[in-house]
Amino acid sequence: MMKYNFQIMEFGICKLSVIPLRSNPSDKSEMINQLLFGDLLIVQENLKNWVKVRSVYDNYEGWIDLKQFSSIAENEFKRLNSLRQNTTLEFVHLLVNKKNNSLIPIVFGSSLPGLENEEFALNDEFFAYDGDIFSNNQTITNLQLIESASVLINAPYLWGGRTPFGIDCSGFTQIVFKTCGIKLLRDAAQQATQGELVNFLSEAKAGDLVFFDDDEENIIHVGILFSENKIIHSSGKVRIDNIDHNGIYNTKLEKYTHKLRLIKKII
């Protein structure tokens, strides 16, 4: 577990379904990521009505609206960060705040730290969740990865998105692996630094990550090998396309849309 220097630091947690993370402190700024319920945050900077935060899960930084920021004390941050992590497997499920009986709809891949007997605590509030979860003490197989990926089929593509209602290519792979207890970095180029290199597509297995580059050899896309000659990825929507040693072939468009660069085995 990563260690932190806690001197003069501020901490927070995402207590909403989804919070947009922006590149600059403005509602008009590009959304570069999304925070999901339960994501722990470390404050990097404060500027008027905006807070620059770093997500503990993947160290991704960006700005969120101060009105959407929920502060937690240092000791609560340490407690939550030390707990067993549980990840929601329901497409959407209602979380109950038992303090005021309010409901929060949370999405696939959200975090519920320390969930026990369908309850967990954040600060002085208790929450109830009776949906399906993945707990980090479970083992995982490639088949479970494929089953998790299949849940998101037809989710629309959204730059910076991480939810069933909008998700980008690396957000898709990150959330799928998160629901199987495996931590990936946020961007495709970052994810390409993880795992073990697979030399040929013929040697790859379902569940392996497949990366694609542009003409300048920059990695710009990632998907999950679905079967020997199929890939599941977010491109327009989460979809299953053909793949060979050249790249992804879209039968509807009747052309290759992505050029194969490398394959990584994660489990």
Image (spheres, rainbow, N blue to C red):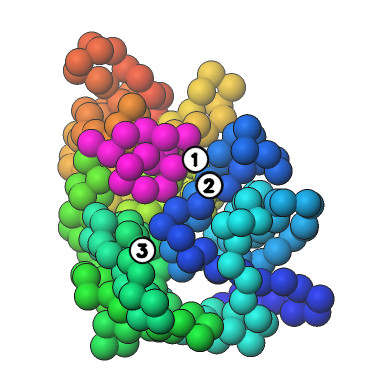
Task: Classify the position of the C terminus by image quarter.
Answer: bottom left
Q: Are marks 1 and 2 in contact (CB under 8 Å)?
A: yes
Q: Identify the residue under disc 2.
A: 20
- Specify which label sits upstream in the sequence, 3 or 1: 3
Q: Label 2 is placed on what type of residue?
A: Pro
Against 261, residue 145 (above or below) is below
The residue carrying pointer 3 sits among few (fewer than 14), some (14 to 19) or many (20 or more) residues within 10 Å by Cα, namely some
Residue 160: assigned label: 1
**Relative image position of residue 218 (x, y in whole percent):** 56, 30
Q: Identify the residue under disc 3.
A: 104
Q: Nearer the viewer, mark 3 or mark 2?
A: 3
**Relative image position of residue 260 (x, y in whole percent):** 39, 29
Could you tell me which residue is drawn at 51 percent across and 64 percent down? 14
Q: Label 3 is placed on what type of residue?
A: Ile
* Residue 93 quadrant: bottom left
Q: Label 1 is placed on what type of residue?
A: Gly
Any part of residue 255 in sight: yes
Relative depth, front residue between 18 and 5: 18
Q: Nearer the viewer, mark 1 or mark 2?
A: 2
In terms of secondary structure, what is the magenta stretch mainly?
loop
Could you tell me which residue is drawn at 26 percent across and 56 percent down? 92
Relative depth, front residue between 214 and 106: 106
- Specify which label sits upstream in the sequence, 3 or 2: 2
Determine the CA span between mark 3 and mark 2.
17 Å
**Relative image position of residue 120 (x, y in whole percent):** 38, 83
As helix, strand or loop, the secondary structure at mark 1 comes to loop
Q: Magenta stretch containing residue 158, yes or no?
A: yes
What are the residue bounds of the magenta stretch? Answer: 154-168
Q: Are marks 3 and 2 in contact (CB under 8 Å)?
A: no
Against 134, residue 243 (above or below) is above
The residue carrying pointer 1 sits among few (fewer than 14), some (14 to 19) or many (20 or more) residues within 10 Å by Cα, namely many
